[in-house]
Amino acid sequence: TLPLPLAAMDKSLPKAKTKTVHHTALPYAEVPAFLTYLRSGDSIGRLALTALILTATRSGEIRSASWDEIDFENKLWTIPAERMKAGREHVIPLSSQMCHVFKLAQGYREARSQLVFPGQRAGKPLSDMTLTKICRDARIAAVPHGFRSSFRDWVAEETQFDGDIAEMALAHTIGNKVEAAYRRGNLLEKRRILMEAWGAYCCQEKCRDEGNESSPIELARSPEAEP
């Protein structure tokens, strides 16, 4: 406990404001071309970044994904509470495209390890820098976490999905009453439709321009050497 004069002084001081960190995001219109770029190479790092984009998850959540969390039969990925930022279990419906990515990742599976995306060190996941370096090598002005914003912008500007559904897909807290109401309904199926639509959008090879003609979005590329 602070001495009385110091306590009074402490109360009189302005509270420091918490700064919101904005992660650089790739415009959603350029995401399909970036996915095409990722598919042009074969590495566990590219698969992990593809998975991060298709599931709109955080880097740590995707890099530490475990095979025992994946339910291929029901097309679900259940991330336990201890691995989530909000400390609550998060269930992600898997799109057809995402199921394919997980199946490709099985080719990198290590003996005696449950990690879906293993790093170079035995029993350790990929480093966050691996995903960041792929973005840098592609010369895009974006970081892995920014793809969550790309997803959110796409939902808001290109779809009719409820914003709260998108927020729950991002594992954001939307308020107990609203969340409880959604959980009483078919929230999981609504999110499944959303993630299937996002997967279909991301994995197209071309995007429509203003003239409604198909034209590829060009990305500057450079040789990649993943750690």
Image (spheres, helix red, strand yellow):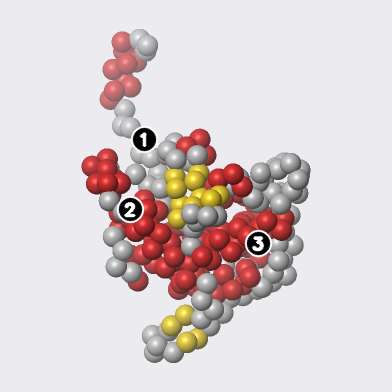
Task: Measuring from the top left, give residue 27's x and y in whole percent.
Answer: 45, 68
* Callout 3: SS: helix
What residue sits right under mark 3 in the picture? 104
Nearer the observer: mark 2 or 1; the answer is: 2
Task: Measuring from the top left, give residue 148's x and y in whole percent.
Answer: 45, 57
- Residue pictured at 62% horizontal, 68% vertical: 38
Closer to the camera in the image, 120 or 108: 108
Q: Amino acid at mark 3?
A: Leu
Q: Is residue 133 visible?
A: no
Nearer the observer: mark 3 or 1; the answer is: 3
Residue lying at the far front in this picture: please name it: 73
The answer to whether 165 appears left or right of 53 in the picture is: left
Label disc, if present, on residue 16 of the rendered structure:
1
What residue sits right under mark 2 in the picture? 187
Location of the C terminus by quadrant is: bottom right
Crowd rating for badge 3 (residues with CA inside 10 Å; few <14, some 14–19, many 20+) = some
- Residue pictured at 35% horizontal, 71% vertical: 158
Q: Is residue 200 above or below residue 164?
A: below
